[in-house]
Amino acid sequence: MDAVKYSIVVPVFNEELVVEESYKRLKAVMDTTGESYELLFVNDGSRDKTEELVSAICEKDKNVKLLSFSRNFGHQNAITAGMDNASGQAIVVIDADLQDPPEVILEMIQKWKEGYDVVYGKRVKRKGESFFKRITAKLFYRILRSMTSVEIPVDTGDFRLIDRKVCDVMCSFTEQNRYVRGLVSWVGFRQTAVEFVREERFAGETKYPLKKMLKFAMDGITTFSYKPLKISTYLGFLTAGLSFLYLIVVLILKLFTDVTVSGWASILSVSLIFNGVVLIMLGIIGEYIGRIYDESKNRPLYVIAERKGFDDGQEDKQVR
């Protein structure tokens, strides 16, 4: 694979309405650099015409490459595949929906040339997002930051530039439940931010509904913190202590007073509370055990069904 200056990794999933505009804007930005680059689209099992449209772009532009998964493996694995196959000295990750303005890449490149190894985009304003999404995102980043020893910047996404040596370290990771922005922070190196205003989607619908957002949040927390397990332990001791105190109160009332001990209502209420606490603790433990199970299977992170625009002679079907 011939070395290029910049690799722009663009994960896509059902983005037929925006992929051509995304290509035009990315090309316009990268052409201004006057340096070599590649636009590496990673098709994450799209069920619309996304793959067909990107394939057509590959035919007319030698700077465009396409990796197509055999099925949907998820956004974070699509980013990983892009990093694995990028040949640039600097790698930029950006979504195709144009919420992260491609023009900001030029500012990232400038910071990289100043000596920074990681330049991440920091959102100072989020257009077109509901109050619920804005407030939950804000809370998540701050909760995660408080729960982990890794300094993960708040109000940032996967939109960032990383140096080749950072990418090489990232490519050595094999964990299944990936939280890429957290892993980039974990590896260290010299990092800085570029602030920007996040725009509305150019077209189409968000690919992160509430269910996926919750799983993504859980991946981030369980990947970089075991504090939920410690909280479960403390909660267990607290529950046991309160139960013991309640038992003492019941015995005192029974043995030394004429007060009748409350019957079914009080017993049922206490039982429901304590059982609820136990189930929450078991659920937290189960999340970690499930991730251990995923790691033990050691399955590939993704399967590549087709490659276009590459001239390195690699086989069409690959796993990682």
Image: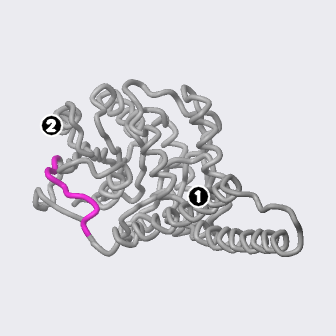
State the image coordinates of residue 28 (x, y, percent, origin top left).
Answer: 38, 32
Please, what is the dominant secondary structure of the magenta stretch? strand
Q: Residue drawn at (49%, 64%), measured in percent from left and top?
A: 183
Q: What residue type is labelled 1?
A: Gly
State the image coordinates of residue 73 (x, y, percent, origin top left).
Answer: 28, 52
Residue at the right extreme of this rendering: 257
Q: Quadrant of the C terminus?
A: bottom left
Q: What residue type is labelled 2?
A: Glu
Residue annotated with mark 2: 59
Q: Quadrant of the N terminus?
A: bottom left
- Circle 2: is it few (<14), some (14-19), or many (20+) Cα within 10 Å? few
Earlier along the polypeptide chain: callout 2 or callout 1? Answer: 2
Element assignment for label 2: helix
Q: Residue drawn at (66%, 55%), measured in percent from left and top?
A: 264
- In the figure, 312 relative to 108: above or below? below
Residue annotated with mark 1: 276
Element assignment for label 1: helix
Residue 134 on the magenta segment? no
Per the rendered image, the range of residues in magenta is: 299-308
Decide if residue 168 is on the left or right side of residue 243. Answer: left
